Image: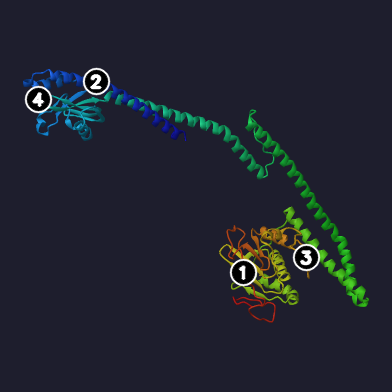
Amino acid sequence: MSTVVLLLVGWVMMSQVTDGVLESRRSSAQAEAVAQLASLSNTIDAADPNTINQRLSELVLGTNRPGLYDVLLVPTDSSTTNAIRYTGLVDSDSIPTELASSVMSDDTKLWDTYTVIHYRDGPSVPGLVIGSQLRVTSAPVERYAVYFLFPLTPQQETLDVVQRALVTAGLLLVVLLGAVAWLVTRQVVTPVRMARRIAERLAAGKLEERMQVRGTDDLARLAVSFNKMAGNLQRQIRRLEELSRLQRRFVSDVSHELRTPLTTVRMAADLLHESRDQFDPISRRSVELLQNELNRFEELLADLLEISRFDAGAAALDLEDVDLRDIVNRVLENHEALLERKGCEVRLDMPEPCRAQVDARRIERILRNLIGNAIEHSEGLPIRISTAYDDDAAAVAVRDHGIGFRPEEAEMVFSRFWRADPARARTTGGTGLGLSIALEDARLHGGRLDAWGAPGDGAYFRLTLPRRPDVTLSGSPLPARPADASRVVPEKSLVDVGAPYQKLTGGEDQ
């Protein structure tokens, strides 16, 4: 911007200086031409008519001011071109055609213009031409065009000096402005960059980082405020970390402490449950309810213990090479009763072996949660389970066409104890920790668990796992959302099968 402004200022100044120098020279040249024309007219009128041609040549030579201007005398009669008189070997081509026409058409005033003066024995130079007519009553040719050619070499040199001075001053000023801008920017940007680096370190967990405070200006006050903010954040984060640690310890301790009384209660409940046929109907129903609630309580304790192990970083993998299709079939076998009760049909899309090095127990727990939720919320509509793999990843997708959930709830479904509808009746016991544990199991493998849902269009969960522990996931062989997301879901399955599912090794839907 400074360079553009300087260019504009330099152009305006150069234009004004050029106009001033040339206008001054033009005024003095016009005065000189008027005086010389008057002198020529008076001298010719007093000359002898018999010697007028000789007198014209002498007058032209006498009028010349070597180094200041040259004179060119041109007869108006085109048939007497040999009568052209000039000084300083100036060429008649130096006279512009427009100026010559103006001089010939009007003999009452002076005409002038800028041109290039050509010399027969030297280089061409910029110049000013002033022309007018001269009447000679006693000569064969009554009118002559007189041109005064003023070289502008001194003025051109002056303008060159001014231009070089402006360019030099402009360059120096641009350099100076650049240095000042760099210095000011450095003074302002350096603390901001320092604040950015400190903020990045704070975000990385280095809560003891602080900015250096220098001076008493606004940037120094900014550094003081930043340090106060960092100190407050450090105290709050440490307080939250301590609360989180105490919470995790409390959950872990309570879960372990409840194990002992729960074992005693379980033993007593098992004895009662085995003898329930000897009780009256009300007592027998009470024993069955006690057994079911103890089962749910044990599941909750197991989930809490598992969560505490994840929080403590104590979870470990027992890797083995397995086919994910075998795990899917095993989970479906465990859900036969629920599938029959819900009337759901399972369609499998598992055309090829899908092998990966995983912890089979944890992957089975993930799929048990995903498939169980799909059956629970499918509203009796079909469920599709798909597997796929590529060179780096293996994936399993579970798609139901039940009530679904809103898109903004896709992340919340993995939150602990979260349910889309807490008041909804459930036919199976749930702790609200299943999907959060499944997500941690997927992360422990270096994989990912994605969710998609739409109200009335069901839900879609995709589990993507690296096929080897040394692989970093960059994608998934299955899409992030189901292909039929925009289609209307039929109320009945496209095929009628007797069993809720069938183990597959081929690619046909059952």
Mark 2 vs mark 3, CA separation in Å: 114 Å
Which is closer to the viewer, label 3 or label 4?
Answer: 4
Residue 231 on image: x %, y %: 72, 38
Mark number, residue 292:
none
Q: Is residue 117 left or right of residue 356?
A: left
Q: Which residue is mark 3?
A: 430
Question: In the depicted view, which residue is nearer to us: 38 or 405?
Answer: 38
The disc, 1 or 3, on the residue closer to the chain's N-terminal end is 1
* Residue most extreme to the left: 50
Q: Are marks 1 and 3 in contact (CB under 8 Å)?
A: no
Q: Is residue 456 above or below residue 155?
A: below
Q: Which element carries disc 4, helix, strand or loop?
A: loop
Q: Are marks 1 and 2 in contact (CB under 8 Å)?
A: no
Residue 27 on image: x %, y %: 29, 23
Q: Are marks 4 and 1 in contact (CB under 8 Å)?
A: no
Which is closer to the viewer, label 4 or label 1?
Answer: 4
* Residue at 64% across, 39% down: 198
* Residue type marked 3: Gly
Q: Which residue is mark 2?
A: 32
* Residue type marked 4: Ala
